[in-house]
Image (cartoon, rainbow, N blue to C red):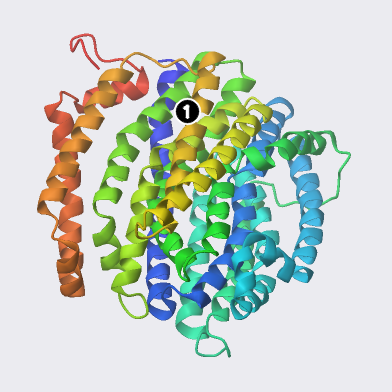
């Protein structure tokens, strides 16, 4: 059995491990968002908090799942493979000290310039002074979150290189628990209740960093930080990181642009996009982030060992998993958008109108889910080879396309008097994500870093057919939107659960009816081809 053959089952097992922790985190995230909707709904105060949280959260994505990790993990992995643990430990010390110093400066600047930062990221708030002042005040609490969470990203990357994935995957749970606690118990203490959430964000960052410490110590990676801008490996990380600061977080740039433009639309638009994005992030966070966390170290090792076939096979396996899981998830989100929003959030301050508006955005985001997810696997195909320039070029094209589409779709939406113009922002972002993924895939194929194995076309046709069958059944069985609003919570929850489980069953039966068998899936993941006796994939 070759290393490529053995890698597929390990890839699946490790992805499931990370996905399990991420799944728990997402469930708690839903609890958190349900409480947000109940206590604060979708209005100016919630818009202000979401902007104050999105700004450091944008940089968190940039570091934790973007440029820093994409540069740090390959360099640390290569150093550990070539020079052993002492060299890796030395790099962790110098990288943490250097990054920590930069973060302290950036955090201080962010706190002191909070009103001007809000002007940049939410220019529409300038027309609403109270909302602007509230957002700026909360940003002073949330911005230091960046300091803690970026160091968490460094710790998580270090542990991943050493093959430890569980603790980094479990860490986000603390954010959701802290914000749940802040919503339940701190909102009644502070003068402005919504500011309790900003305090909770800061506390969550400190807790997440503290959680990493025993795991780092156990692997000999708990070191005294040292500033080392001239350290060769640190300089290599910076050289890889600087051009990729933009390219690694194109999706987040587009979502942030969505938020900025949404501040010019009706009050509540930022919140509607947020609640839709949170539902879209469920499959993205549970599956795609877990898969991306596993893929990057594996690609780095394959590249360091000059194992081109293993490199290509890892990419191919991951993309097949994405097709099997994400396409039906996207279809399910689009078809059940209204029932999901009503069941999860429509209570307290979040009303039926809010559910309708958020559902429009969720349908638009679902159209791009396959692109959002594929980027999490395709971008590491470049970063593992320490190529940051190509994703940057592609990222520029994607953001340009997003801005162009926004400039076309939003005025068209308003001119035609269609409801929910904020959904045009989500649609533009989805189309830009699909373009970004397609260009990344084309680049890897042209350079022959990804050589698709046989069986892709039959697999695609079967997944599309099974997903279409699932959508047809769900549309036929799902009650109308008005009926969801009239039903009580338990009937909503039971009906929605039945539809989801039924949809999954129909999808699986559809795959079986189309000729896909469990051993086909195993063979597709292990060899990229069917067993000889089937004659098909």
Measured as percent of width and height from the top left, residue 123 is found at 63, 64
Q: Can residue 124 be seen by looking at this rendering?
A: yes
Measured as percent of width and height from the top left, residue 146 is found at 67, 60
140 relative to 514 in the view: left or right: right
Q: Nearer the viewer, residue 143 or 7?
A: 143
The residue identified by callout 1 is 438
Which residue appears at 24% of the width and 54% of the height?
336
Which type of secondary structure does the marked residue at label 1 adopt? helix
Measured as percent of width and height from the top left, residue 320 is found at 36, 28
Which residue appears at 12% of the width and 45% of the height?
473
Q: Quadrant of the C terminus?
A: top left
Measured as percent of width and height from the top left, residue 198 is found at 59, 74
Q: Can residue 162 be seen by looking at this rendering?
A: no
Q: Is residue 329 above or below residue 191?
A: above
Which residue appears at 20% of the width and 66% of the height?
493
Q: Nearer the viewer, residue 190 or 474?
A: 474
* Quarter holding residue 52: bottom right
């Amino acid at each position: 059995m070759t290393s490529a053959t053995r890698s597929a089952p390990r890839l699946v097992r490790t992805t499931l491990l990370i996905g399990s922790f991420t799944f728990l985190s997402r469930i708690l995230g839903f609890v958190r968002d349900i409480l947000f909707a109940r206590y604060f709904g979708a209005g100016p105060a919630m818009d202000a908090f979401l902007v104050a949280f999105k700004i450091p959260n944008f940089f968190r994505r940039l570091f934790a799942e973007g440029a820093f990790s994409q540069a740090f993990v390959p360099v640390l992995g290569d150093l550990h493979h070539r020079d052993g643990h002492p060299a890796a430990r030395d790099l962790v010390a110098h990288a943490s000290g250097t990054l920590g110093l930069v973060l302290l400066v950036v955090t201080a600047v962010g706190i002191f310039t909070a009103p001007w930062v809000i002007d940049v990221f939410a220019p529409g708030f300038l027309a609403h002074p109270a909302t602007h002042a509230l957002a700026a005040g909360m940003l002073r609490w949330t911005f230091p979150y960046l300091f803690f969470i970026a160091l968490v990203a460094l710790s998580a990357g270090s542990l991943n290189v050493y093959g430890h994935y569980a603790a980094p995957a479990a860490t986000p749970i603390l954010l959701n628990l802290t914000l749940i606690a802040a919503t339940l118990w701190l909102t009644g203490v502070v003068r402005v209740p919504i500011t309790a959430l900003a305090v909770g964000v800061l506390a969550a960052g400190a807790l997440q960093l503290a959680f990493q410490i025993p795991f780092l110590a156990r692997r000999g990676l708990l070191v005294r930080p040292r500033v080392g801008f001239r350290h060769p490996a640190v300089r290599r990380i910076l050289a890889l990181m600087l051009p990729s600061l933009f390219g690694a977080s194109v999706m987040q740039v587009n979502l942030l642009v969505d938020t900025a433009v949404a501040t010019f639309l009706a009050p509540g638009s930022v919140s509607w996009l947020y609640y839709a994005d949170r539902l879209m992030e469920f499959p993205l966070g549970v599956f795609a982030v877990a898969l991306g966390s596993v893929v990057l170290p594996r690609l780095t090792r394959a590249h360091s060992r000059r194992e081109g076939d293993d490199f290509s096979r890892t990419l191919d396996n991951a993309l097949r998993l994405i097709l099997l899981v994400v396409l039906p998830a996207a279809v399910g989100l689009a078809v059940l958008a209204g029932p999901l929003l009503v069941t999860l959030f429509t209570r307290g301050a979040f009303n039926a109108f809010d559910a309708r508006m958020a559902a429009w955005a969720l349908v638009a985001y679902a159209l791009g889910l396959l692109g959002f997810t594929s980027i999490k696997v395709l971008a590491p195909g470049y970063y593992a080879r320490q190529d940051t320039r190509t994703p940057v070029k592609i990222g520029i094209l994607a953001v340009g396309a997003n801005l162009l589409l926004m400039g076309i779709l939003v005025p068209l939406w308003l001119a035609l008097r269609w409801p929910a113009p904020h959904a045009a922002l989500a649609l533009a972002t989805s189309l830009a994500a699909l373009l970004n993924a397609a260009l990344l895939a084309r680049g890897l194929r042209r350079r022959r870093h990804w050589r698709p194995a046989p069986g892709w076309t039959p697999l695609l046709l079967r997944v599309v057919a099974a997903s279409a069958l699932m959508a047809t059944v769900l549309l036929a069985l799902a009650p109308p939107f008005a009926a969801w609003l009239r039903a009580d919570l338990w009937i909503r929850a039971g009906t929605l659960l039945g539809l989801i489980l039924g949809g999954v069953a129909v999808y699986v039966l559809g795959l079986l009816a189309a000729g896909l068998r469990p051993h086909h899936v195993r063979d597709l993941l292990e060899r990229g081809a069917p067993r000889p006796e089937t004659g098909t994939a």
